[in-house]
Image (cartoon, grey):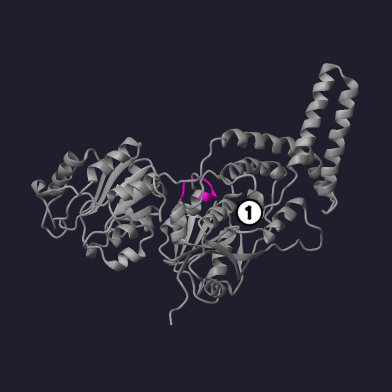
Amino acid sequence: MSGPPSYCVVIPTVGRPSLRTLIDSLAAGTGPQPAEVLVVDDRRSPGTPLHLPAGIGDTVRVLRSGGRGPAAARNTGWRAATTEWVVFVDDDVVLAPDWPARTAADLTGLPGDVAGVQGSVTVPPPAGRRPTDWERNTAGLAGASWITADMAYRRTVLAGIGGFDERFRRAYREDSDLALRVMDTGHRLVRGGRQVTHPARPAGFWASVRAQAGNADDMLMRRVHGRDWRDRARAGRGRFRRHLATTGSGLAALAAWRAGARPVAVAAGAVWAALTAEFAAARILPGPRTPAEVARMLVTSVAIPPAAVWYRLHGLVRHADAAPWRLTPRVVLFDRDDTLIRDVPYNGDPARVEAMPGARQALDRLRRRGLRIGVVSNQSGVAKGMISLTDVRKVNERVESLLGQVDVWEFCPHDDADGCRCRKPRPAMIERAARRLGALPSECVVIGDIGRDMDAAHAAGARGILVPTVRTRLEEIARAAEVAPDLRAAVDRVLGERWPR
């Protein structure tokens, strides 16, 4: 009888101190621990080290996503995962003591059409007082659907739809968008039995005004998923229509006053004042009603309606031509032997170089679309003394004469026993090639013919596409997230001209 499926935990973070508490709660949990914990540092310019527990060993790996937002950070994380399931959790939650055991139970024995399993979120109320407006908003997470505070997905499903839509730059709507796209493929999302606690973290005076930026994301949701997206995503309607009426009446009052129409200005101003007072009261009455909270509610209740309208209009213009998400990479990195050219073991003779069928056409298609091209290749014959570094470079020059210019070459001259970081399945060659081309590993696709190529891609946080040959083992094919029958089909997938299957 097989055991529970393996899973990784992906934690995007901006460096909050709560990250350490989260990892401590995971390590102390009962039940099968994750195969790996992937912490994705999404700070634009990391300075101080992350708040990680001491002595975490090899189970926690830190990746970087370049400050592009939680959607891009989660993509970096799941692409580096090698397990069947990926569990996303926020860096400010605390896991229940039995979370690992319940996670394993949630993921065991699921039918193939179940693509995701949501955990339950509890937001503890403040002790001894009523919650503030911000705390009540945070409490809404407890009833939200498919939020990535604790959400598990099959990795193959994520690969099939391109992961999270990175146009969502805030922690808002990116999880609902992903859930709708997953369900559009015919898969189901279900609820599990595991639980996390999500404390309401402190917020600044203008936090509720800044949150109105989410109105622009609502326009992206509407453009991509249609007018009924709120019903499908189980999202509330909000107060935008009232905000629009409030803003409209305020602008009308100002315009009438400037035009000298005093009665009209007074009437429109009265409407604005009544709507603003109603909004402020709706936020003040359920709260603690302290002087500081009342002052914040009065000021921000004036600012929120025009901010909401402004961001809605901004999103309407910005996303007017938005199409369904397809993650288009910037860089494609190829294995060399048996991917671009026929494999001749330890070849140092340029005359023996023979291009694989369709290799030149595949690379030319990528060049025409503006993608950069690189090669990452293990060349252990150098360490074995069978070829020299000069031989490798001469063969690479012959490859370029047949297939066209390659933007970056990276090859590893070591053998397995050398313990280097560059020999695949280790990620250093991919990381160096991406850095030399001014890209992040998560913006790269690695195309190769064996499991080591795919493992190196996952370890670097890149996307991997396997193009099998006669030497590719069946278990490598079964384990790969994406498989293409030839180079042409692999490039189809890279360019999004055919959806992955």
Where is 260 relative to 5, above or below? above
- The reply to whether residue 434 is in sight is yes
Q: Is residue 346 left or right of residue 420?
A: left
**What residue appears at the point 51 percent right and 51 percent down from the top-left corner?**
164
Q: Quadrant of the C terminus?
A: bottom left
Which residue shows up at 27% across the image and 62% down it? Answer: 419
Confirm whether the magenta stretch covers residue 218. no
| Main SS, magenta residues | loop
Q: Is residue 193 left or right of residue 9?
A: right
Amino acid type of disc 1? Ala
Above or below for 94 versus 69? below
Helix, strand or loop at disc 1?
helix
Residue 67, magenta (yes or no)? yes
Residue 98 in percent (x, y) is at 59, 75
Residue 478 is situated, as x and y percent measured from the top left of the image, at: 34, 66
The image quarter containing residue 94 is bottom right
Q: Is 405 situated left or right of 222 in this image?
A: left
Along the line of sight, the residue nearer the viewer: 413 or 443? 443
- Pointer 1 local density, CA inside 10 Å: few below 14, some 14–19, many at least 20: some
What's the magenta region? Answer: 65-71
Q: Is residue 15 visible?
A: no
Q: 59 left or right of 175?
A: left
Q: What residue would you read off at disc 1?
A: 233
Q: Position of residue 263 (x, y in %)?
A: 91, 23
Q: Residue furthest bottom?
A: 1
Query: The N terminus lies in which quarter of the figure?
Result: bottom left
